[in-house]
Amino acid sequence: MFPALETELKQETLPDPYEDFMYYHLQYYGYYKAQRSSLPNSATHQHVWKNNPRYLLSGSFGKREDLIPDRLQKEKRLWPSCLPSTGCRQTGSLSRDSLMLSSPFVKSRQLLYDDIGEVNPRLREPRDLFAFFSDSALLQAPRWPIECEVIKERIHHIEWVPPQPEYFYQPTGNEKIPEIVGEEKGTIVFQLDSVPTEDCYFTSSRVGGKRGIIKELSVSLQGPEDNTLLFESRFESGNLQKAVRVNTFEYELTLRTDLYTNKHTQWFYFRVQNTRKDVTYRFTIVNLLKPKSLYTIGMKPLMYSQLDASTHSIGWRREGNEIKYYRNNADDGQQPFHCLTWTIQFPYDRDTCFFAHFYPYTYTDLQRFLLSVANSPVKSQFCKLQTLCRSLAGNTVYLLTITNPARTPQEAALKKAVVLTARVHPGESNGSWIMKGFLDFILSNSPDAQLLRDIFIFKVVPMLNPDGVIVGNYRCSLAGRDLNRHYKTILKESFPCIWHTRNMIKRLLEEREVLLYCDFHGHSRKNNIFVYGCNNTNRQFWLHERVFPLMLSKNAPDKFSFHSCNFKVQKCKEGTGRVVMWRMGILNSYTMESTFGGSTLGNKRDTHFTTEDLKSLGYHVCDTLLDFCDPDRTKFMQCLAELKELLQQEIHKKFKELGQDMDLERSWSDISLSDVESSTSGSDSSLSDGLPVHLLNIADELHQKKTMYKKKKKPLKSRKQRNKQYHRNTLMLESKLTEDAPERAGFPSTLQKHPAFFRTSENARSSMMKYEKSRLNKSQLNGRGKSTSLDPTDMTTMILTKNKDRIQKEKPGFTVSCDPKRSANPSQEPAPPVKPSWSRNRYPGTKGSHRTAVAYPSLHIYTYP
């Protein structure tokens, strides 16, 4: 098209300044892979690339000095001056477009490339909906509150199943109860500087937590012979606030409360270093809050040795002797604390060991698992990963949608839904291990798993409270509140995880039936695994909510206890997930509680649960779902009949305890199930109910301002009160007119101003005495009195006697008019006093009505001509 241009381009090898600029710009952001020698100019680019389309993809980054030897030369390079200006612009434009659109130098993650390096017009799936991770992507770093110091070390533990059962500790009764010494007599070897308490509230977060240099909180060793233990808990899910050395090998430990609260000390997870072999150490946790614990019936703490893990592949195991859980006798006027003490011998010298309340499962552990699912070409076909929301600290709350693709829209619409959630309480890591077992099975190629994916849509939120898990809380979020009491909340910004979960389920219910909702929890006072459900009030589905737990107990008889289940809905649990979802219309709505201890059933009696035991329960949940939805209803009806028999026995037992007889053949099914069941063993979660901490401060300020500037409002009155007030005002007006009438006629008034009504007899009597005294004084001054003086006591006695005689002669219901026109005759006798009338008078001014005054026994009204 332009012969001169083509000839010139063949001779010239100078690069295009625009392309050089774009190359530098894009290389700075990591988009180019090729060497500088492989970068052609705009004129020869297409020719070279077509001859060898793949060489650019296998190169490496070039050096800046190789690309542009002299910056001034780069700035002086221009297009050939012999070319027409229009031709240069067109060719340059085409070259730039071809470079930006078809060059593999430009690294785009949304465009797909084929084998020969050409751009495929197809786009990738949206990453925010389906894939958060790629093969080379790093895990999302956890975000911490800015008050928290975080060490840089990555803590990771191997999974291991003990070859032998780990039995409960058998108390001997001779366990030592150490005296609490405290830091006054001991030496602080570890203490967190700044711990947010109930006086603070969450403001912001960042990756890595607090800015600045990480301090060494543990004491410095004085030499190789120094046997002081070095403590640390400033890592993910760690919890230890202070360690005090009270003896050579004895330490008192203080746990950190949930952030922005002063409660919930149960979860512990910390590291010790510089251990000594064959020496008995004693650890005592001094500020536990729960009066009852599984440690009283044989539960042991968990220990992890890094040397054992690296040399023998041994992970977490139950350790400890002389275990004692007891009340702290120190009385400082606050809530009573309880202590946990145990002794232990470390297996190696100078080892690094960890202690924990239960098997930790961190937010990073979850992300590693989700990364493996996202990178699996098979699992990612039926498991779609989404962001449900962001937590208060900005951590991602993940939502998994698991189902096989339907062949037709009608088939997809017929699928029922199952919703599973876990870790709303961050210190209950048992829920994460059950969830992992469920996900391992449902994402497998097992025929049962494929069948479940064919007939159900699973909505899974594996970690509802990532903030609490990261910082090592036991029960609360960074709002300082228990999320499992706020499922009815409207505070989206304060409780985003719960708000979005409820709304997700609400939208799901509008699309299809939700067969089952289950929230995985941990329990600190009861052994085995059980559920809390909700009694169904619909007689058509009577006892149906108990069928699934009964089936689960049959599928896992050595782990799940149906007799520990409870289906009573208490008022204090109205904000929990299971109750809110049940009221939204999900019949089978459960909270699954798994113990921190172990089993008292079957072959696993008196042994601790391992992670494999908890993961196996996740499999049993899937197996029970198939039994529950089996088209052959034989199992379902058998369980229903068994439930009726069990309930009948329970009612008979209840009445026997009460000493009453009952005809169970006729009326037992009409008894309320809530009356038969006892209340669930409550927790102190209700103490964490209410507004978030930061909103409480705002509410207090608003209340103070309201109290300061608020005008006192008159209370609303009923119609009866309004009528009474109207009648009072009318009588006061008539009394005033009666008083003013003699003055207008030229006579002095004998009526004194007084209140229209007296609410008590004392006020009425006092007013009567004042009025009579005034009237008699005026009579004496006008010459009408017979005596010139009168003793006040005699006068009062005379008036009261006279009034008493008049009252006795008076007929009930008689009223006297206050209109002066009706008493104009001077010879007319004074009207007798009238007893008070409590009947409701009609409105004055209406037809047939007359105005009357309530006359008290001591009130005498005289009129003069």
Image (cartoon, rainbow, N blue to C red):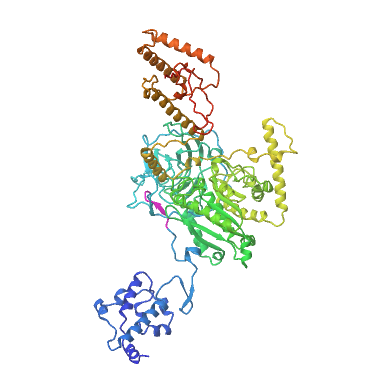
Q: Residue furthest bottom?
A: 3
Q: Does residue 439 sit above or below 285 in this rendering? A: below
- Relative to 557, 494 lies left or right: left
Assign the C terminus to one quadrant of the image: top left
Q: Foreground: 32 or 25?
A: 25
* Quadrant of the snapshot with the N terminus: bottom left
Q: Is residue 169 visible?
A: no
Above or below, comparing residue 795 to residue 704 in the picture = above
Q: Magenta stretch containing residue 838, yes or no?
A: no
User: Percent from the top left, x then y, of residue 122?
Assistant: 49, 74
From the viewer's perspective, tell me whether residue 357 is left or right of residue 12: right
Q: Which residues are magenta?
A: 141-147
Residue 511 found in image quarter: bottom right
Q: Position of residue 264 (x, y in %)?
A: 47, 42
Query: Looking at the picture, does residue 260 appear above or below residue 513?
Result: above
Q: Nearer the viewer, residue 763 or 864?
A: 864
Give yes or no for residue 142 being in the magenta stretch. yes
Q: Name the residue nearer the viewer: 354 or 623.
A: 623
Return the residue found at the far left.
72
How far across and how far down the image is residue 103, in percent? 41, 78
